[in-house]
Image (cartoon, coloured by chain):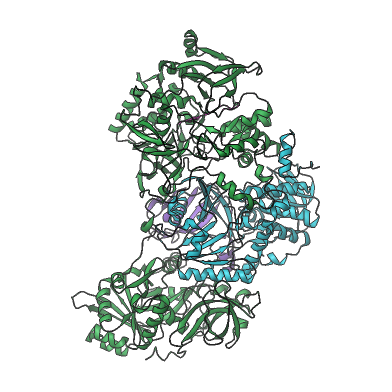
Amino acid sequence: MSLFTCPFCGSRNLEEFSFHKTLPNVAGGAFEEIYLRRDAPSHSDEHWQHRYGCRAWLRVQRNPSSGEVFAVELLTGTKP
Amino acid sequence: MQTPRPRYSAAALLRARFSRHFWKPLWNPAKPQDHYDVVIVGAGGHGLSTAYHLARDHGIKRIAIVEKNILGYGNVARNTTIVRSNYLLPENHYFYEDSLRRYEGLSRELNYNVMYSPRGVVDLANSDDEMVALARRGNAMRLAGIDAQLLDRPGLVRFAPELNPYLPRRYPIMGGLVQRRAGTVRHDAVAWGYARAAAALGVDIIERCEVLGLTTQAGVASGVETSLGHIRADRIVFAVAGHTGAIGTMLGIPLPVETHLLQAMVSEPIKPLVGSVLIYMYGHAEVYITQSDRGGLVMGGALDGMPSYTREPAWHRLEEIVQSAVALLPQIAGVKILRHWAGTNDQTMDGSPLIDRLKYDNVFLNGGWCYGGFKAIPASGAACATLVATGTAPDLIRNFRLSRFASGHMIDEKGAGPYPVRQ
Amino acid sequence: MSAKLRTGRRITGETFAFYFDGQRYCAQRGDTAASALAAAGVRAFGRSIKYRRLRGLLALGPEEPNALLTVGEPPACLPNVPAPVVRVTPGMRLYSQNRWPSLRVDAGSLLRLGAGFWGAGFYYKTFMWPSWKFYEGLIRRLAGLGAAPAESKLPQSKVLHLDADVIIAGAGAAGLRAALDAARSGQRVILCEREPVIGGELSFETASIDGVAALHWVQRASEELGHLGARIMTDTAVISARGNVVIAHKQPAGLPGADTLLRLYAPMLVNAMGAVERPIAFIDNDLPGIMLAGAAERLISDYGVCVGKRIVLFGNHDRLYRTAIRLRQGGVNVKAIIDTRALTASASRAILLAAGVECLQAYTIVRAEGGGAVRAVQIAPIKKATAVRRVDCDSVLVSGGWSPAVRAAAPSDWHSVCGAAAGELALAAIAGASDDDGEPQLEAYWRSPCATADEKNQFVDMQNDVTVADLRQALAEGFCDIEHVKRYTTLGIGTEQGATGGMLGAAIVAELSGSALAAIGTSRARGPYQPVPMGVLSGSRVGAGLRPERRTALHEEHAKAGAVLELMAGWMRPRYYQGNGADAFAAGIVEAARVRKQGGICDGSTLGKLEIAGADAPAFLDRLYLNSASAIETGRARYAALLREDGIVLDDGLLLRQAADRFTATTSSSHGAHVLSHLEFYRDTEWRGRRIAISDVTECWSVLIVAGPASRTALTAVLGRAWNEPLLNLRHMAFVERTWSAAAGVGAKLRLLRASFSGELAYELHCHPDIACPLWQALVAAGLAPFGLEALDILRVEKGYLTGAELNGLTTPMDAGLGAMLKAGADGLTRNSVGRALLGREGYLAADRPILVGLRAADGKSQFLGGAQVTTTTTATQSLGYITSSVFSPALQEWIGLALIARNCSAAGNELIARDPLRGGNTRVRIVPPAHLDPEGQRIKA
């Protein structure tokens, strides 16, 4: 995996994007949200930012064992 | 039964020349028994070291290590071989100092040459402010009785002549913090040496046996389900650094862990150039360089930057790390990179390890090693064995408990917060 | 030297001299070091790493394990350059490696005497007494291949990004065929070939393709591809391929110097990189003069070099016979062909038999003989290895089959493999050739039988001196998995990553352990596919290109004023001005004292500036910042801090309210990018759909910090009458924005903010960068002397203000003395800003939590330094905290500092020890409030 498809900018080099964190996918309060992760080998739900591009925050779903990208979506949900 | 092993020495090497079947396997492949006192999951550095100490220090007889791949093929085979205890926070520097002291005597303890090379590890500073930060860390080490020395520019060039001040550099180097007892250890030898010693103490090392699940009975763990069948166990230790997140998934509990790639690379072998371990940070870029005894420049840097279990290093990070290496040592621009590879780090929310009970009273986790796994192996095994055998964590690892995040007792060496990619 | 000039496909006839180990040789343009030296009869190119055995050419590409040379002389030499790759240039100086004092006479060869002792992994079993360190120095000097360069004279290499529909790696028969197919169907093709010429093995192929001779077909294909717009890149090796991005390395002349690193983007990659010929292991199979058959063929066809006069061919397939015919056509005496197979039906064989060439079937070579080079081979029937016969020869050409050139790149949905790389060896199938021999009818054969004692001379991996004996020993010691074998014996970890020896080693491991080769597998190959110089990977990111130097609009002013610049958060900032003192310490004191006495001016442009606008901006900032933004009146500013989610202070700065729905937030120079991302995250998540716009305006505004009692007077003189009113009436933390015109007539927006980071009456002038210089010049002319970071640090430590030294990533607002911000607002409500939720954790409230304090020497004069640890006694090992900053205060005439000290030990007046064993020793210090000077803030309000 060397390219990401940004909903705004299209297929761009991976190094334009910066990963922030994976999501815990558990119900809970601030502590769970901030400190816990669902770090499964088969599926990862992540926050990224297209930092050296349009700067949109993205939700990326990937398979961290194969590098396959399932989805890249805007965190705002839709294009404005 | 274990076959008797020849003791290693120069004399043994001579004798072996005249005896055909002199050498014996370091460990014999074992088939799983029905029941063990302790089953350790993962035959990496930490699993092997824990097994060795359980058998040697606590006299536990029936120990098995189950490994889904082959022994010593995870991070213990993929690191840059650096051992050091130059940490800022007491929770870290006392622990890593214990480990370094054990490394100093490990070759003779195991009768296996792990090639501990106290060549010195030096952190370099680009500015006076960074010198102050290094002084803070060095003073903290000295308070704890750990060797540290602050070198000014001339002292640094005397210590590491390859940092020739007349070569063109983007950033000036103001000085550095050196720990002279720190250095390198031959990584594979650590795995093999512990495996040989553990096997000699009767530990069953079961390779190509994948753990598929945990079985429980009356609220405690009763064994592990594996690809070779069920194995009953009184106590279970997960020492699967790099796959700790997968254990959380298996047990259905989210852990304070993200799995990231950390890559390393090696150049073609050249005659001695870098005599120590150089650690260089500027801005957010980082590189560490040492030279193996074979002559290859071994380098590493920051995480690849996204969760991954693939062990496939990212190309752009290779370029960035090499850029930093050439910025530090411009003379190596013509030296060629031979290979790069990656290990999977279980990065925790404060960059420090996790050694604690996990979900059940008789299940233990030894993981979350972040960047520090290799250098921790001897201390981790000894302390984890004490926890497993006695049920009480020794002081050295008491702060590595899982609950520290909820209670606000993080051990955040870098001050990066719960964002593993920045740790 | 032969009087007759060699002719070959790659050489031009133009001759010149070069030097190998100091001796003069002749080469033609286009020659590689391997071809030119082989033409001159050189057999030995170097010595092996462990046993120091003389070694010659084995292969004729980057997979060459033996003939590695050093190009040039120290300090700027290039080590480990494969002789078959580097193209010779006039006067070039080449050196053999791993020998001392000379290639012929080498002291290290004595190591061979203990060959049995130095078996696989011997170093794990000895050198433990007295310590490894005792032996390491000598071992390190013996190891390593080429010399370490002491400098580099390489020019900066280029980086090129290209995109295409198909990238084809390898321009041999398969690659050319694939390229033609793709280009004809209208696809944009990039064809990469690592050699300087295309065609691969068609160089010496006698079959014809599409009705024309092979080489003619190559020529036609090249022309057609040119017409179709395909891009053919020679000297370009594909070195990595992942996820639709291919990395290729173009290196003209086979030597670093004019390299380009290519990033090729395409939805499709075709790997046509061919295959690497394998040797067969027999006793002393590493003698110079023993080489791979394909290498010898290429030496003849491309360089006109004949490797010997009496040649023995040895292998396990039909190709041997075709090779023999071509060699004979080149006038070479083929003495014998040793075929390990019992039955062959090759038509070529019949021709050779008819011509009287000895063709032995079911025979093998058991041993090579010779000193500096092979002189004879001992051959025997496979079934009766003791019936040895001797055949004199000066060259042995071996071919044990082919392994795919690149094992690392597994086929995937975007990546296909064709030709020899996919195991297809028949040219008819690859490119539609006619009158070809067809399939080579290969029968696996890996090594000849030998006594166990002789296995230490059957070489598997030549570069690392791995022998069959080593593999046997590894197995005996329980290293059975191929990855364990690799690590224990060093099989396949050389510069060629086991290209020639890896598969052979795996096969012998299979044989010795009684397993199937498929079950053993080969060890995992690692990228890059070929070694690549670090300077090439650096590309343009060297020197100033490594990180762009950020300069403020006032950079030239600082230079004129003699500023000593320092890098801070990527910016070049004045640390001090040279006229004010001999060094930073002296000048800083002078500059700081002057600010307090009169006034000064400082460049603050590097502060981060974020503009947050929109109807929801006030509520948004209330959520992000600890203190309330919505309570700020328009035209006013407020000191504010924001937290990370875990409750730690992320950054502090000022919040300026320009309008009901418009704010500017300043950040520290080093945290601007982080704060921006942090705000954008909340904009896109929690606040999605709300009316908030965030812009980074850091570089849109220059900032001039004007401080000191004289600042108002100077500003009044410079800004003009229109600014008199605000200068008189502006309260602390209030600002106005107007247009200001310089004398020269340049007018732009200027924001005058009354705020102080020095504790003096002070203003920040935020202005358009275009007017920064005239404004600065005018203020300096009005009597304000520039001051730098050193003075700024003194001024702020005197006041106990925070910087990154205190906000170190571990500090909570309570630790940093910002607890007041957490209190309930005027409305009596405690606000729910980011990070507050986790502030109540036990560890954050602990009694020994380090909090911000001021520090003085107990004796009022001793020095103490930032970075010292603080303890209760001179011998205590438990640190209570550390000194974050220390300065010599010109106002107080003593050393003062700030520190983070355990709360339960930080009562004012408490005496502790500053421990600084690294730089001096112990200093007795006394805790004081952080604000050392004017705690009531009288001067600010002046």
Establish if C210 lies above or below B349.
above
- Name the residue furthest top: C354
Which region is colored magenta?
A: C274-285
Spot occupied by residue B253 in the image (x, y as percentages of width and height): 64, 59
**Visible in this render: residue C521?**
no
The answer to whether B122 is drawn above or below residue C766 in the figure is: above
Chain A color in figure: purple
Seen in the picture, residue C324 relative to C190 is either above or below; the reply is above
Which of the 4 image quarters holds residue C732? Answer: bottom left
Q: Give the x, y percent position of residue C95.
A: 45, 39
Image position, residue C733 (x, y; %): 38, 84
Q: Which chain is green?
A: C
Residue A50 found in image quarter: bottom left
Q: Nearer the viewer, residue C446 or C140?
A: C140
Report if residue C427 is visible in the image.
yes
Relative placement, left or right, of C472 versus C84 is right
The quadrant of the rendering that contains the C terminus of chain B is bottom right
Assess whether residue C275 is covered by the magenta stretch: yes
Q: Quadrant of the N terminus of chain B?
A: top right
Q: Colour of chain B?
A: cyan
Q: Position of residue B207 (x, y in %)?
A: 69, 43
Towards the viewer: C308 or C657: C308
Prevailing secondary structure of the magenta residues: loop
Number of numbered labels in the structure image: 0
| Residue C205 covered by magenta stretch | no
Q: Residue at 35% of width from left, 34% of height from top?
A: C17
Q: Is residue C528 left or right of residue B411?
A: left
